[in-house]
Amino acid sequence: MFNSQDKDRGGGLDLKIHTPGALNFKGSVVLPTIKGSLVATLWSVLITCLHLFVTKLSMPSTYISTTSFVMSLLLAFKNNSSYEKYNEGRKLWSQLLTLSRNLGRLIWIGIEDPEPKATEEKRVAMDLVLAFFIAAKNHIRGKDGIRDEHGILRPELANLIPSKKQAALDAAEERRGSTASALPLTEIVVEGAAADGSGPAAEVTLQVPDAPAATRGAGSLRRPSKTAAQYGFLDGSRGNLALDVTHMLSAYFSAQLKKTRTDSSQYGGMITTLNTMTEVVTSLERVATSRIPYAYIIHLKQIIAIFLILLPFQIVDQFKAWTPALVFLIAFTFLGVDAIGSEIELPFGDDPNDLKIDVYVEQLKWEFTEIVKTPRAKLNEWDLLDD
């Protein structure tokens, strides 16, 4: 929970422009690129030695122009698609930050707190808004659940979700893990008529869950989800904590409306904002799961490999002993551009080139801490006109 007695700290964003230099390796693609570049260089050294000391191995350079054109188109497509996802992810996180700020303001201003308990409930609701933002960040990084893979309560969420709700979430996660994900599959052969009704269609084998896991003992192990192996945040056995938080907030808003601590217009604004926050998380899932088709990626890598294999044969007659150096530079250029597209395609992690989502979290935490320092009863200080 926010502690309004915490020592004040600056909450502004770092707006300084940090321009990396050419020799700055942090955040660059040198490491993923250097291996392929060295392999291409060693290959060119072999071809150069054979050409200079054994037999002529040169060939016409027409292949360079035709292949490099196609390769440039594919590289441009990949990098444009990757940056489009990066840019959309940036916009979605900014939108989620805006919605969280709006919801926090609606809660603190739009809900009356005639007694200390009501004020404490509002603080808890503000905590839950921040918990939603953090849970969405963890969710999109494949770190679902209130506990980590070792069963330890995530420290960034420990003080934001009430202990009573933590116990309920633990029970729900245990239930999810001991039912659907632990059920053995039983094959059932289903026969049906053909579409034209002329005869039986081909047999279809369905795999359905067996008897409830509760009848098989509580010690059943979870089977890893194939979906979760590729997209961790779609693992149904861990649940979606951000969605669970929306349920808590919706119940709180409904309770405040019934107690007439807020009116229907404020209630509608809070529910609409919460619905939009859920929509943004769904859009983030779409960005994370919409990868560039594998056909483009595979074909691009094949063309780059063929290009670098044939490159020494086409330039060795002209550049002779300088051929390996030139091949290294060309390989580093093309492989580097390809690596950049792969680096920014999924920008939700914590790599140097990923979006600075943790900065948003700290900013929102600081802002909410400042908001709750001003009780709602003192908001008349903001009146524009004196009585």
Image (cartoon, rainbow, N blue to C red):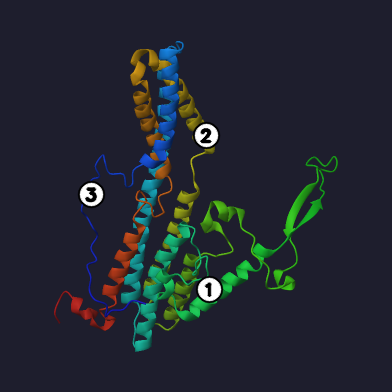
Residue 332, quarter of the rendered image: top left
Q: Which residue is mark 3?
A: 18
Q: Which residue is mark 2?
A: 298
Residue 380: x %, y % from top left: 21, 80
Drawn side of residue 312 relative to residue 365, left or right: right
- Cα distance, mark 2 to mark 3? 35 Å
Q: Which residue is mark 1?
A: 169
What's the residue at 36%, 83% (across, down)? 120
- Which class describes the residues within 10 Å of circle 1: few (<14), some (14-19), or many (20+)? many
- Cα distance, mark 1 to mark 3? 42 Å
Q: SS at mark 3? A: loop
What's the residue at 56%, 59% (across, down)? 235
Is residue 135 depicted above or below 372 in this figure?
Answer: above
Q: Is residue 272 visible?
A: no
**Mark closer to the chain start, 2 or 3:** 3
**Mark closer to the chain start, 1 or 2:** 1
Is residue 349 depicted above or below 104 in this figure?
Answer: above
Q: Is residue 113 visible?
A: yes
